[in-house]
Amino acid sequence: MTLSKEEAVRFLRDVLHIPDSSKQEPSLSFLNEIVKSYQHVSPWQCISAFALPRSQRHLPTWEEIKRNQFAKRGGMCYENNMFMKELLYAFNFDVNYASVHVYNPNDHLTIMVHGLTGSSSRHWVDVGSTFPLFHPIPFDFDTNTIEYDTGFLRQRFVKTNSIIEWHLWRHNLPYDGCKLTNDGWYKFAYIKADIPCDLNVFNSPMTDWYTVEEGNEFFQKPRAITYEKNKLIAIKGQKLLLETSNKVIDRKKLENFDEVVKAYETYFPQLPTEIVQDALHHTVFNIELSN
C-alpha cells in the first residue's frame, strides 16, 4: 500500500492543481498548500460506501481508495486520511497515523507530521472530518488551549496530559449526547497525539462505519460535504446547506428524491448519478423520502 512519487506528483498536478511539485522538499508551507487544496477539491462523503448492496459492503481496499481519490470523489476519514498519509510520505514527510476517539476508541483515523518547524515539532492533519481544518494544527502550543475560527465554525484544542481534546463552540453541536463544558464548548473528540498507530488498530471500528447500519448516523442520513473558497457546501439527508458570505448557514429542505439527486449533480458532479441513486435506495433515507 504505497503511492509512488510519480503518482503523488500527478495527483497534485491533475487533482489539486498544484504544479511543479516534483522537486518540493517537506516544509510547513508545502504541507499547508496540500491540505488547503485538498479540502477544496475532495469531499467528505459516505455515498460511495452505501451505494453497494448490503452483502457487498466492506472496508475499502487501497486500490479502491486510490481510484476514488484520483477521480476527486473523496470518501470518509479512512479513505481521505489514509490517502493523505501516503501522499505526504511520497514527498518524504515524516508522517504517521494518529487515533481519535469520537464515539468509540479508534473510530476516527487521522495523521501526524513531525519535524517541520523543529526536531520535535508535531502538526496534526485531518482532511477526513466533516468539520473544516484548512491547515495543519501545531500540537506544540505552549498554553493549554488554542482556538481557530474557520468560517461558520469555531474550534479549539485543549491539552489534557497526553490527550488533546477537540472542542466545538456551543452553536455547533456535533452530535446528540456531546458533553458541554463549563465555558460553553462541546467536547467533540479526543486525540491521542503522542501515540503513533498502526493502520490495523482501525480495522474493526472502520469496518463498522462501512457495514453496520444500526446506530450509524451516516446510514440514517447519507451526506456529502465540501468547501468552496472556504465556505461550506453540504447535503445531509434531505437538507442542502450553503454557507453565506456572513458565515451563516442557509438551510433548504429538498422535497423529494429527484431534488436530492439534482442537488448532488449540481454540487458534487464527480459523484456519478447512478451511485447517488443507489446509495439513497440502499439506506433508510429512501423510506423518509417516500412518506
Image (cartoon, helix red, strand yellow):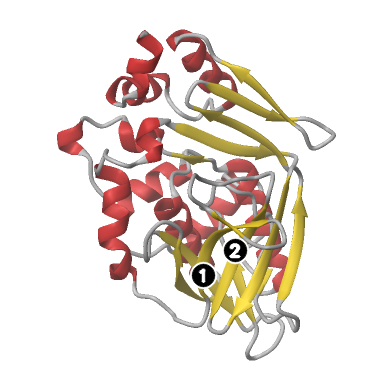
Amino acid type at mark 1 = Ile
Q: Residue at x 43, y 11 (%)?
A: 257
Which percent across, then down, holds residue 202?
Answer: 32, 64
Q: Residue at x 48, y 43 (%)?
A: 74
Using the rendered image of the protein, determine whether residue 25 is visible from the camera's viewpoint: no
Using the rendered image of the protein, determine whether residue 239 is visible from the camera's viewpoint: yes
Q: Which residue is mark 1?
A: 191
Which percent across, then down, holds residue 96?
Answer: 46, 75
Q: Is residue 283 above or below residue 184?
A: above
In which quadrant will I find the C terminus?
top left
Which percent across, then down, holds residue 13?
Answer: 61, 50
Image side of residue 222 versus residue 10, left or right: left
Q: Which residue is mark 2?
A: 166
Tell me the CA gap for discs 1 and 2: 7 Å
The local crowd at label 2, few if under 14, some if 14 to 19, many if 20 or more residues have their Cα within 10 Å, is many
Q: Residue at x 49, y 16 (%)?
A: 260
Label 2 sits on a secondary structure element that is strand
The local crowd at label 1, few if under 14, some if 14 to 19, many if 20 or more residues have their Cα within 10 Å, is many
Is 218 or 55 nearer to us in this picture? 218
Q: Is residue 257 above or below residue 192?
A: above
